[in-house]
Image: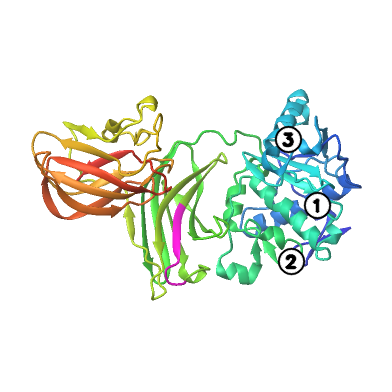
Amino acid sequence: MSSSNDDGTEDSVEDERKYTSAYQLNVVYFVPTDNPPKPNHEERISEILLHVQSFYGKYMKRWGYGERSFGLPMEDGNTVDITRINADGPASDYPYDGGGSAVKEEVQAYMEANPRAKTSDHYLVLLPENEDGVGAPYYGLGQGWAFATDREVMDVDNLGRERDATVYIGGLAHELGHGLLLPHTTHHASENEQLGMALMDAGNSTYGDAPTFLTKRSAAILNVGQLFSETEGEFYGSARARLNSIKGTVEDGKVVVKGTYETDMPVSEAIVYQDPEGRSNYNAMGWVASVSGQQFKTQMPVAELTKTNAGTNYEIYVRLVHENGTLSSFPVTTYAFEESGKPKVNFDLGPRDDTIDRKGWQIVDFSSEEVGYDRYASNILDGDVSTFWHSRWSDRDPSPTHPHFVTIEMGDEPSGVQGLELVQRQNGQRNIRGLKVEVSTDGESWTSMGAYELEKTTVAQSIRFGREEDVRYVRLTTRSSWDESGLASLAEVRAF
């Protein structure tokens, strides 16, 4: 017996069943009280999962990660063991919106009552299609959970023949990717020509019908995932990490990015993404960077970017892939393509070694602070990036809007200042975008040093005044936030 791959090749049943793992995917068929299983569902889904397992394994090997794929529970060596769970309620209790959480709760209760049935921390839950048109959960919830719908047309023999077979089997393969902690990502320009559509982009609509593949950045994440491990261990635990510095330039037609980080959990690889505007993050392109001594570097050819029109905006961000399977993500910067067709990339972010000692600094004025959650204005001077000032949001009517301000006294005497070093709130929420800076020697007469657009990044960033100024007081006034809210937050402020 054989089955067709997405690119027209075929794998034997024996090839499809060669993968071993210390953990297996929990495959659950969840049956509402008024919606029975689809005909021949066990055999069809078993063959589908073996087909998808082979697809993932093919690209793990292609990208240098060996003969590995996600583990499946096998009933007799040839058939996937599918756990049937009879739901507590009718299909209407498990709609597309919000139904995933309800299903998850019942599946978890079943596993707690039947602990031997649980084979890993990852779940693929299928619900039979609702004939009355009521939608069912069909998405990845994250944290190891994926949901899909079972339809009679879902048969590997229908791939390339029945459009719905591609859409729903491909959809299962895509959502399973999310259940394996894969984010959306698309192909590079040359990959599209050679390999087709990335599964974690729109591969759900091409799988089995047109060339479709798993990207190297997806494989890098799967490489440290629980279901791909051949030995037992601890997965997805805590990983405290911080991006310390990062620099980006354009050299010889390539966007070169290098950075440093610190973490208490070793990193397997780093992934640097370039995400053009539009389509959420579906069209984010990534490059896998090897790591050494908590440093990474990658070179990304401009010719591989899929959108290079003048004015096209890109966001650069980094994911650290920890050895325990946990991912740490860090926004870095944004840039645009120039009229010449070249990317305007030139950033150097990180802590300075020439900042002024903050002994004697204090907050002397502010527009508001969130006292109930310890988001004091003084947090921007405490040396801890995990604490931050936040404009007050509770008990406010009407809702707060910009501007918000905070005023710092830099000791008893003025100092020569050329600029400021700022650190945004680390989780990206309420990060300041537009900022006005004023300075004073007496706290009464103020000189504007300009309006600036801050980077949406967790890394320390510097703004320069253009000249040295005698400064005793600094007033920071927000003009806007990156999330377009009327609120603002900031972690640290230093001067140089």
The location of residue 393, given as percent across then percent down, is 39, 34
Marked residue nearer the N-terminal end (3 or 2): 2
What type is the residue that disc 1 sits on?
Ile
Q: Secondary structure at mark 2?
A: loop
Give the residue number, with chain letter if any, for mark 1.
48
Q: CA distance from mark 3 to mark 2?
A: 35 Å
| Residue interval drawn in magenta | 309-317
Vertical placement of 163 versus 341: above or below? above
Relative to 318, is 386 on the left or the right?
left
Marked residue nearer the N-terminal end (1 or 2): 2
Q: Are marks 3 and 2 in contact (CB under 8 Å)?
A: no
Residue 7: which numbered mark, if any? Answer: 2
The location of residue 228, given as percent across then percent down, is 66, 44
Q: Secondary structure at mark 3?
A: helix
Q: Nearer the viewer, mark 1 or mark 3?
A: 3
The location of residue 476, given as percent across then percent down, is 24, 43
Image quadrant where residue 298 sits: bottom left
How would you rate the neighbour count of disc 3 (Cα within 10 Å): few for under 14, some for 14-19, many for 20 or more? many
What type is the residue that disc 2 sits on?
Asp
Give the residue number, with chain letter if any, for mark 3.
103
Q: CA distance from mark 1 to mark 2?
A: 16 Å
Q: Nearer the viewer, residue 120 or 385?
A: 385
Q: Any magenta on residue 314?
A: yes
* Residue furthest right as drawn: 39
How would you rate the neighbour count of disc 1 (Cα within 10 Å): few for under 14, some for 14-19, many for 20 or more? many
Residue at the image position 71 percent from the left and 42 percent from the top: 21
- Quick check: can you spot residue 230? no
Relative to 199, is 386 on the left or the right?
left
Q: CA distance from mark 1 to mark 3?
A: 22 Å
Relative to 67, is 365 on the left or the right?
left
Marked residue nearer the N-terminal end (1 or 3): 1
